[in-house]
Amino acid sequence: MKQFTLTIPVALLTAATLPAVSHASTPALEEQLAELQRFQVIAHRGASGHAPESSMAALELAHEMGADYLELDVQITADGELVAFHDDEISRTSSGEGKINDHTLEALKALDAGTWFNEAHPDQAETAFEGAEILTLDEVFQRFGHEARYYLETKSPSINPGLEEALVETLEAHDMIESGRVLVQSFEQDSLLKMRELNENVPLIQLVWYYPDEEDDSRLLEWTGVTPGPGEITDADFQAVADYAAGIGTNVTYDGEDVINVDFIRQAQDNGLPVHVYTVNEREEMQRLLDWGVDGIFTNYPDRLLEVVE
């Protein structure tokens, strides 16, 4: 079943329909912010259900499938290079061990970041995945350029000092900001505010993660305290986020139970925050969230989501 979304020509969008944070200085940025009012297919670490996460194969598949955004986590190596890698420890998705930011780029490039996928998913194993390299952000941009949009997370900023400065420098060098090619997300509000200080035009997404209070499981908390739990959140809380962010990214469930609902989504939207939910891989759940009116879904299977949306 197709989810229909009202499409408004960019020229007719008023300040009231755009996120309150908009400092857009170019038509391309204005267009990007306007398009956040429409549904976005966000390829979580690429098409990571089909190929090794954050690999060139996964990104190429997602791009070919027609995902709106290629989603990646960004970390910094011991010698100051930006790489696309999710975990702080490298052993799960590479042949190496230790923390990613304890290694130089040369050392990371020598690792096999693909064979693990074949071992974990023998039914989807491909010989071509063996020996996949950990990618630099420059390599990703050089491959897809302005033909794709990117949804980048400042990952673990406390153990990646200098990450925000290096990221803004790289985004500017590749003209990804003013051309409307990038969103930057983080659970860490301080990291987003630092990005804003470095370049006020970077569209930001505040990530949140809701879970039950151990002392009172009827009450939900947010991981970093950036907002109250959904049962206590107010318009003012959403507006505080909208002062610097162009959207909010949230989990839907915790331990199989919903932590947000339609009211949460509508309240966020009414306060200028499109809602993107992570990470959804089953068609039935995708459709449920489309029916709720979410503005985007992170998924390891962008092909599935695109089929549901159609």
Image (tube, helix red, strand yellow):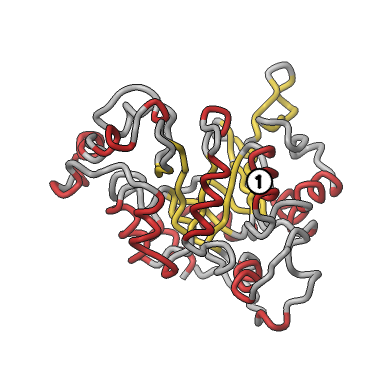
Above or below 99: residue 228: below
Assess disc 1: are there few (<14), some (14-19) or many (≥20) residues with their C-alpha within 10 Å of its C-alpha. Answer: many
Image coords of residue 170 (percent x, y)? 49, 53
Does dot 1 land on a helix, a strand or a loop? strand
Q: Which residue is mark 1?
A: 206
Q: Nearer the viewer, residue 125 or 161?
A: 161
Instruction: Identify the residue shown where x is 57% and y is 65%.
Output: 39
| Residue occupying the far top of the picture | 215
Left/right of residue 117 with respect to residue 299 in the rendered view: left
Above or below 270: residue 146: below
Image coords of residue 45 (percent x, y)? 41, 48
Residue 62 is at least partly visible in this image:
yes
| Residue occupying the far left of the picture | 127
Image coords of residue 124 (percent x, y)? 21, 46
Instruction: Identify the residue shown where x is 33% and y is 37%.
Output: 105
Q: Quadrant of residue 34?
A: bottom right
Left/right of residue 221 with respect to residue 255 in the rendered view: right
Instruction: Identify the residue shown where x is 65% and y is 66%.
Output: 33
Left/right of residue 63 with respect to residue 33 in the rendered view: left
What's under tag 1, amino acid-wise?
Answer: Gln
Image coords of residue 225 (percent x, y)? 73, 31
How many circles with numbers are drawn on the protein? 1
Q: Quadrant of residue 164?
A: top right
Residue 307 is at least partly visible in this image:
no
Instruction: Identify the residue shown where x is 53% and y is 59%.
Output: 172
